[in-house]
Image (tube, rainbow, N blue to C red):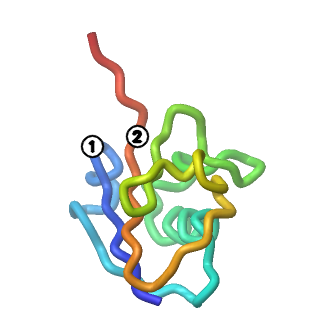
Amino acid sequence: MALELRFFANFREAVGQKSIEREFEAGSSVGDVLAALESEFADLAGDVLDESGGIKPQLSVLKNGREVVHIEGTDTDLADGDTLSVFPPVAGG
């Protein structure tokens, strides 16, 4: 299945572009995709998933614009044509 992967702020810098398309096996989950991204891009390694395979605190990962923590977290299923967006922690004042 084809996915569009979007990156923001320092994650965009780590990947080298705003968005990429990648092919994954049908039935892949958000956790599968994030683990693959950490393996592919050395500058993402350890910055997206924690030691137990969960999404690190304060990160936002959206499937088609909806926060995955409000779906099934890293177990959220993906389908052909989905968009997954990854936002680092944001602070401001």
Q: Position of residue 54 (x, y in %)?
A: 68, 49
The residue under the point 31% across, 61% down is: 6
What secondary structure is marked by label 2?
Answer: loop
Is residue 29 placed above or below 45 in the rendered structure? below
Horizontally, residue 51 falls left or right of residue 92, namely right
The residue that disc 2 covers is: 88
User: Which residue is drawn at the image coordinates 32% and 56% (left, top)?
Assistant: 7
Q: In percent of the image, x 61 and y 47: which residue is there?
A: 55
Residue type at mark 2 is Pro
Q: Residue at x 46, y 54 (%)?
A: 44
Judge whether 58 appears above or below 12 on screen.
Answer: above
Q: Label 1, on which residue?
A: 9
Q: Residue 87 in the image: state x and y as whole percent.
A: 38, 45
Residue 8 location, x and y as percent?
Answer: 29, 48
- Snapshot quadrant of residue 84: bottom left
* Above-or-below relation of 35 to 79: above
**CB atoms of marks 1 and 2 within 8 Å:** yes
Q: Nearer the viewer, residue 26 or 13?
A: 26
**Label ID, residue 37:** none
> Residue flagged by tag 1: what amino acid is it?
Ala
Q: Nearer the viewer, residue 61 or 14?
A: 61
Name the element at disc 1. loop
Q: Position of residue 66 (x, y in %)?
A: 44, 52
